[in-house]
Image: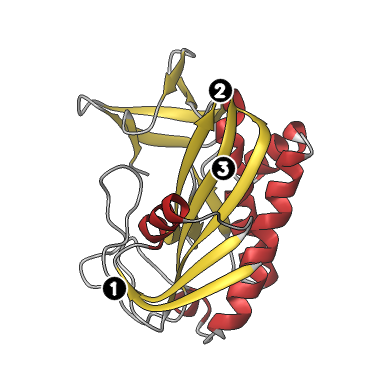
């Protein structure tokens, strides 16, 4: 693993994309920022982090043999890598909230942003951005955000967390390269937040309804069973889980 440490940078994902355009990147290159000033989440969302208290980094991963139709398995693998890291750190009640938010004690502590490039019918490579709240003690105007410290009352060594986290993520991505799709699928679903439980949702039109998460399709659509036993399929931004 090639680790590049930078004090302050707008976005580690953007930095890696620009670096990829100007040079040949080594597989598993990691860019770590002490302070990420314009972190990005899914689509137009932003990711807030506190310097020295959080981990904000991106991994460059070469693929080649992963089919485009299996793109969501990249998200599954990365989510599982983060999940297993938090379990190793003895963080309680960890779950993966579709598509790839990581929850601890019902609050979000980690965000993931994956940007892939395509060559013909395969995924050529991916830039995987991770924002993990580690030692933050408070979040202003973010009642659903948390950190490892707030969840456990313990402070964590940032470097130790980074080492475990990158190792676990790369292990799960290796499973994807070995085409262990069923294993990734089953593990992802076994840790899926609110799986099989009656929950309240809101669709893109603002309509609220009760439903049960039945799973996620191979291409990343959330499957929700409504009260009349109808199965509905939702993409990102088409549905919101309220509780």
Task: Give the mark nearer the N terminus: 3 vs 2.
Answer: 2
Give the Cα separation between the discs numbered 1 and 2.
Answer: 43 Å
Along the line of sight, the residue nearer the viewer: 201 or 38? 38
What numbered label is drawn on residue 139? Answer: 1
Q: Is residue 218 visible?
A: no
Quick check: 210 left or right of 177?
left
Answer with the quarter of the image where residue 16 lies: bottom left
Q: Secondary structure at mark 1?
A: loop
Along the line of sight, the residue nearer the viewer: 58 or 52? 58
Give the Cα separation between the discs numbered 1 and 3.
Answer: 34 Å
Nearer to us of marks 1 and 3 is: 3
User: In the rendered view of the protein, which quadrant contains the N terminus?
Assistant: bottom right
Give the Cα separation between the discs numbered 3 and 2.
Answer: 12 Å
Estimate how packed mark 1 is, as few (under 14), some (14 to 19) or many (20 or more) residues with alpha carbons within 10 Å: some
Estimate how packed mark 2 is, as few (under 14), some (14 to 19) or many (20 or more) residues with alpha carbons within 10 Å: few
Residue with the mark numbered 3: 125
Task: Give the mark nearer the N terminus: 1 vs 2.
Answer: 2
Quick check: 130 left or right of 175?
left
Quick check: 216 left or right of 17?
right
Q: Secondary structure at mark 3?
A: strand
Quick check: 112 left or right of 122?
left
Query: Where 91 sits versus 144, above or below?
Result: below
Residue for point 58% across, 37% down: 124
User: In the rendered view of the protein, which quadrant contains the C terminus?
Assistant: top left
Task: Give the mark nearer the N terminus: 1 vs 3.
Answer: 3
Q: Locate residue 156, reporting x and y percent.
A: 55, 84
Q: Is residue 59 visible?
A: yes
Q: Locate residue 50, reporting x and y percent.
A: 33, 77
Estimate how packed mark 3 is, as few (under 14), some (14 to 19) or many (20 or more) residues with alpha carbons within 10 Å: some
Residue with the mark numbered 2: 120
Residue for point 20% across, 24% down: 205
């Amino acid at each position: 693993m090639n680790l590049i440490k930078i004090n302050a940078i707008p976005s580690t994902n953007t930095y890696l994309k620009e670096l990829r355009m100007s040079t040949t990147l080594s597989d598993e290159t990691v860019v770590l920022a002490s302070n990420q000033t314009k972190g990005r989440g899914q689509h137009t969302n932003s990711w807030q982090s506190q310097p020295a208290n959080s981990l904000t980094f991106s991994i460059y991963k070469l693929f080649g043999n992963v089919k485009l139709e299996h793109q969501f398995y990249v998200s599954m693998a990365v989510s599982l890598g983060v999940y297993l890291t938090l379990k190793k750190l003895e963080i309680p009640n960890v779950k993966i909230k579709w598509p790839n938010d990581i929850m601890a004690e019902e609050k979000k502590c980690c965000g993931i942003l994956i940007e892939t490039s395509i060559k013909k019918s395969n995924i050529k490579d991916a830039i995987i951005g991770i924002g993990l709240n580690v030692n933050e003690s408070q979040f202003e105007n973010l009642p659903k955000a948390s950190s490892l410290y707030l969840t456990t009352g313990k402070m964590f060594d940032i470097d130790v967390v980074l080492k475990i986290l990158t190792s676990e993520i790369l292990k799960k991505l290796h499973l994807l390269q070995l085409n262990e799709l069923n294993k990734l699928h089953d593990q992802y679903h076994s840790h899926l937040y609110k799986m099989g439980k009656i929950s309240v949702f809101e669709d893109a039109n603002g309509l609220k309804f009760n439903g049960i998460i039945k799973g996620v399709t191979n291409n990343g659509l959330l499957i929700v069973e409504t009260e009349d036993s109808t199965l509905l399929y939702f993409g990102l931004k088409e549905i919101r889980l309220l509780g």
